[in-house]
Each structure stands twice: as C-alpha cells, then as structure tokens.
Image (cartoon, rainbow, N blue to C red):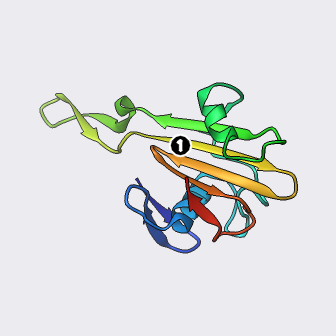
Amino acid sequence: MKIIKACDWEQINLLTEQDPNKFGEALRAYCFVGNCEQRGCYSTFNVLDCFEKVESGLIFEEAKIKLFEDIEPTVYHYKLEEKDCFLKYINDEDKYKKMRIGEPYELVIGWTWDGDGYLYFRFNDRKVINRDCKKDYNWAWC
C-alpha cells in the first residue's frame, strides 16, 4: 500500500519503507482526520470512519503493551479483506468480470495521552512506536 502525504506531496510505500519516521508519519497522516496543520494524537484524535474501536482482546493487548502502563489506551483496528479488493463489472459481452483494485491489509492504531503521548501503529506485520507523539521524528521500529 502506498500513501501520499498530501501536505508534503510525498509518496510512501508501506511495504518497503525503511525509515521509521516516514513510515509512522505516513500512517498518522492517513489514519487521523484533520487538516495539514493538525497532528494526529496531538491536536486531533479523530480517526477515519472505517476504523473500529477495540476495548479488549488480542489486538487491544498488542497495542497496550507498547504504550504508557498506567493509562488506559485508545485502540482502533481496520482490516481490508481479500474479498473486498475486487470490483465487479459487466464486460462488452454482458459477462461479469472481476478486477483487482487493491491488496488486503490490516491496521492497528493505539495511543495513550495525558498531555504527553505514545502512538503505536501496526500495518500488517510492520510496527512502529513514537514515545513523544508531538514530534514527527521520534519513531522507532518495534
């Protein structure tokens, strides 16, 4: 999956990006709803509508162990399934065809906030954490 950071007009390929700062900031720009002057998990805490809030279970625990221990985390999850990566259409012979329009992926967002914040992302099997989410250069691979 490639993300274009509109404010910077930079394309980030999440499958191959080696810089944790670019990877984390691309996911922050993609997942949080706001404008170019708002920073997700700092000045906006709204995420895309496709995400589901998770309050228990394996995904919740996965994020929780990466964040502040004494603050209950906020965790969201989204999974694009293989079956949802196709567009069905009718060709010139009135036959149904399928065209692949994307690849399946899974995203987890987790954060804790008390004036300072930790922000965690998992895209498929790649994970990053920012232990000072006010900054865009504090990302580290997990």
Q: Is residue 86 above or below residue 135?
A: above
Q: How many marks?
A: 1
Q: Provide the secondary structure element on which disc 1 rests.
A: strand
Q: Is residue 108 above or below residue 114?
A: above
Left or right of 71 on screen, residue 67: left
Pick the residue in front: 94 or 61: 61
Amino acid type, callout 1:
Leu
Evaluate whether residue 139 shows in this view: yes
Pick the residue in front: 12 or 66: 66
Seen at 71% across and 63% down, the residue is: 39
Q: Which residue is mark 1?
A: 107
Pick the residue in front: 78 or 75: 75
Residue extending furthest right?
115
Residue extending furthest left?
93
Seen at 35% across and 45% down, the residue is: 102
Which of the 4 image quadrants contains residue 124? top left
Seen at 54% across and 46% down, the residue is: 122
Query: x, y (%) of residue 75?
Result: 68, 39
Pick the residue in front: 26 or 98: 26
Query: x, y (%) of residue 90?
Result: 23, 33
Evaluate whether residue 52 shows in this view: no
Seen at 54% across and 61% down, the residue is: 26
Question: Around disc 1, counting alpha carbons within 10 Å, would you say few (fewer than 14), some (14 to 19), or many (20 or more)?
Answer: some
